[in-house]
Image (cartoon, helix red, strand yellow):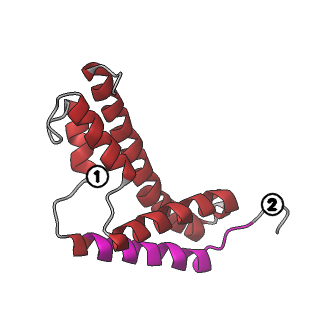
Amino acid sequence: MNTLSPASSALLADLILVLHAAVVGFAVVGQLLFMAGGWCGWAWVRKGWVRVAHLALIGFVVVQSWLGAVCPLTRWEQQLRLQAGQPVDGQSFIAHWLSRLIFFDAPAWVFVAAYSLFGLLVLLSWWWIPPRWRGMR
């Protein structure tokens, strides 16, 4: 039994969407910053824990796309929107624009290919800009 009010469900759906946009931003902008930082010699782009978190995220996205699975954040957001009595695509102003930023309408194979190529880029950047671990020079 759901104990959330429609307003609470809608708010949580919006918060999950904001989190989802932040995760996408970490994946995409993070990779761009790692590459720029490798070129410019920024030390922080070689921090091992940041790079492991990034690699794990991209690995999860790639495997999920190969399996044809829907992202858990997308699924949770959609369930909360339904609980709020909202259509899955009928969102608030901010949710509408965040959704347009991170969701695209394309065949599944396009996402599998794009995520796989992006995952390959992340792996190649580990070779080009190897992470450094604490105590390692």
Q: Is residue 47 visible?
A: no
Q: Residue at x 59, y 69 (%)?
A: 38
Q: Any magenta on residue 75?
A: no
Work out how far the residue at label 1 is from the one at label 2, CA to CA, in angstroms: 34 Å
Give the x, y percent position of residue 22.
Answer: 42, 45
Q: Nearer the viewer, residue 75 or 23?
A: 75
Secondary structure at numbered mark 1: helix
* Rendered-image quadrant of the N terminus: top left
Amino acid, disc 2 = Arg
Q: Nearer the viewer, residue 78 or 24?
A: 78
Q: Nearer the viewer, residue 54 or 63?
A: 63
- Asked if 89 appears above or below 109 in the picture, the reply is above
Q: Any magenta on residue 115?
A: yes
Q: Which residues are drawn in magenta?
A: 111-132
Q: Residues within 10 Å of mark 2 (few under 14, many from 20)?
A: few
Which residue is denoted by mark 2 in the rendering?
Answer: 134
129 with respect to 122 (left or right):
right
Looking at the image, the residue that sits furthest to the front is 1
Secondary structure at numbered mark 2: loop
Amino acid, disc 1 = Ile
121 with respect to 11 (left or right):
right
Which residue is denoted by mark 1 in the rendering?
Answer: 102
